[in-house]
Image: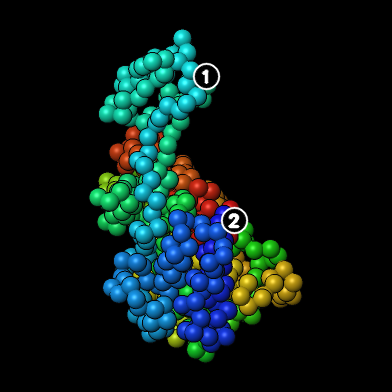
Amino acid sequence: MNNAERTRRELMIRAIKDYYDGILADTIDRIPIEMRPRNVEPNRCCIYKDRAMLKYRLMALLGFGMEEERDETMPLREYLKLAEAGKNHTAAVLSVCSVGCHGCVDSHVQVSNGCVGCFARPCVATCPRQAITVINQRSTIDRSKCINCGKCIAVCPYHAIIRNPLPCEDVCPVGAIGKAEDGRVKLDFSKCIYCGKCFRACPFSTIMERSQLINILNALKSGRKVVAMVAPSITDQFPGKIEQLFAALKMAGFHDIIEVALGAELTTKHEAEEFYERMARGEKLMTSSCCPAWVLAAQRHIPDIVPMVSSTPSPMGYAGRLAREKYPDAVNVFIGPCIAKRREAQSDPNTDFVMTFEELGALFAALEIDVISLNAEPLAEPATSFARNFAHSCGVTEAILEEMSEESPDPKRPKIDGKFINGLDRKSVNMLKMYAKGKLPGNFVEVMACTGGCVGGPCSLAR
């Protein structure tokens, strides 16, 4: 756990404890001062910037971004009142706190002091754009010619050529991040797919998510039935068995828990049927649709592949329907590692809020719930192992293959030739463009935005 994650989780735990004690309105404005007193070495340029960033982190925890701040003197307790009244989450699920941006230099390849101007000069020979020359016995890169291919880095015998990264921009698979005129980060929400890679990568915690934690806590304390819809990837996050985890959720105040893996079983069944129907119509390719970041990437960046994306709802979509049928008046909360699920939930009438694994871990910590120490009864309706494996890369394909193998064999039915994209990056986005043009083999492509699948989500506790 790095310092950014530790700070984020400490704020969550403090806020949850004080909320349950009924004193958060009195304490929230003092939290930045208590966490960064004058006698502590600041993490940033000064103690006051540290406190300012903690304030904006608390605003994000309440569901507001720095972009919504109209009065810098407005105390956090006023934002808390607005959050409790449901007047938060009026903007995108991500927020850019520009005051915390370090203004990093653009990503580029550069020659370090380790260069000795060797006789072989492999960097000069290997550069495809003739961007490297030797001046005064040292290699020099012409930035106007360099394309940052990194070939010179690979051949330098002294490891004297390095890449100077811009972490948030480098990890964005769709070019949604750039720099504003002041040199600080700017997020283009018309391009963003909410994969959360920038959220995890930024070393200065400039990119934040607008949490729904206060809304969920409010629902839990209100006496209303609150149903937890737990993503399959949760078994990788907490110690103990899934039955103990369900017991912990009950202790935290959830009325009932539904495995989203049960929704994955329905997604598997319907996606297999849809595959057969599409192939029977003469279509050549279908892609998975359970990852909301991937679906949005297709819509915004690969329009040619959109007709090939499965129309089957995601496991969260089906789990929401199961929850709504069982408890029509309940508040349904999806719990998972994904930021993009927040955006998916905005258009899902059966999912009211989204809680991340980080937030759930903070809830357990604040309420002093030790998952592994709990006794638990067997689940009334456990999901299959294949459905629970949806959270891992190739899990969707394996579940569909298992579904097909259980059906009566029909020699006329096409066989699945499955391929997979294990994490979206610029290279894999270009590969998907090739799939859309029919230039790569396979008739089914499973796409996961996060490396390793949902278990590698940006808001995971363990990865």
Number of marks present in the image shown? 2
Residue 455, position in %: x, y? Answer: 55, 55
Q: CA distance from mark 1 to mark 2?
A: 34 Å
Q: Residue furthest bottom?
A: 223
Q: Residue type at mark 2?
A: Met
Residue under circle 2?
1
* Residue type, label 1: Pro
The residue positioned 36% from the left and 42% from the top of the image is 105
| Quarter occupied by the N terminus | bottom right
Residue at (44% x, 52% y) in the render: 202
Which element carries disc 2, helix, strand or loop? loop
- Category of crowding for the residue at label 2, using alpha-carbon neighbours closer than 10 angstroms: few (below 14), some (14–19), many (at least 20): few
* Neighbour tally class for label 1: few under 14, some 14-19, many 20 plus, Cα within 10 Å: some
Residue 223 in the image: state x and y as whole percent: 52, 90
> In the picture, residue 374 is in which quadrant?
bottom right
In the picture as drawn, the residue positioned furthest to the front comes out as 39
Q: Is residue 31 left or right of residue 293?
A: right
Q: Compared with residue 192, is residue 282 higher up or lower down, i.e. above or below?
A: above
Label 1: state its secondary structure.
loop
Image quadrant in which you'd find residue 3: bottom right
Task: Locate residue 344 relative to residue 416 in the image: left or right.
Answer: left
Against 290, is 34 above or below? below
264 or 129, nearer to the observer: 129
The residue wearing badge 1 is: 157
Residue 154 seen in the current view: no
